[in-house]
Amino acid sequence: SDLLVRPVTKQGATEVEVLFPSKDLWYEADSLVLASSEKPDEGGVVSKVIPTSMDSIPVYQRGGSVIPRKLRLRRSTHMMKLDPYTLYVALDRESKATGTLYMDDEETFDYKSEGQYAIASFSVDLAGKSATFSNVVELGKGWSSSIDELATSRMVERVVIAGLAKRPGAVTLEGQILSFNYDEETKVV
């Protein structure tokens, strides 16, 4: 799995021990600050004591993953249906990441009976001079005819990338230069 969740099980706890698999980098899920980066060993783990409170649950994203999220707070999931996605990219030691996003109408079982679904596969490779971020979409047979509507209602609004060693010279999308922020301390774009 690409998420590591450490439940807090003791009442009044102010810290918990988190065991990170040492073969991967691990980032805090909300801030994407690097939480564990020890060198891999023979299937070992790294133990860290993490501060916690009643208002927080320690959650971490594995390096090498892309996790889509909808961030706008709503009163119900139905209200979030047309909200855009933010992609959280956590780079691995080779500056690469992959992930998928499954989409359907969020209301019926038509994905099963009518093939009304889509699966977006994301691939990020930021190693070397020429970085790439690709998205390949597989449409179910029931959604093939509605590609134009899907393109406007299922969009990515923002991409957050963790683990960049240095500030990018430029970020472009289909030849258009995009604005971006880079945090030198956290290594997050």
Image (cartoon, rainbow, N blue to C red):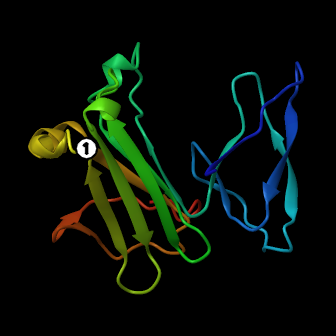
Q: Which residue is labeled 1 in the image?
A: 155
Q: Nearer the viewer, residue 43 or 30?
A: 43
Q: Position of residue 13 (x, y in %)?
A: 88, 26
Q: Position of residue 16 (x, y in %)?
A: 86, 38
For badge 1, the amino acid type reads Met
Residue placed at 25% from the left, 44% from the top?
Answer: 155
Which residue is at 81% across, 29% downward?
Answer: 8
The image quadrant of residue 37 is bottom right
Q: Secondary structure at mark 1?
A: loop
Image quarter hosting the C terminus: bottom left
142 relative to 137, above or below: above
Taking depth in this image into account, of 146 and 62 the one nearest to the observer is 146
**x and y, in percent, of residue 70 in the image:** 40, 35
In the picture provided, is 118 more to the left or to the right than 10? left
Between residue 35 and residue 40, name the one nearer to us. 40
The residue sitting at 62% across, 54% down in the picture is 33
The image shows residue 122, relative to residue 49, as above or below, that is below
Residue 183 in the image: state x and y as whole percent. Answer: 50, 60
The residue most toward the front is 113
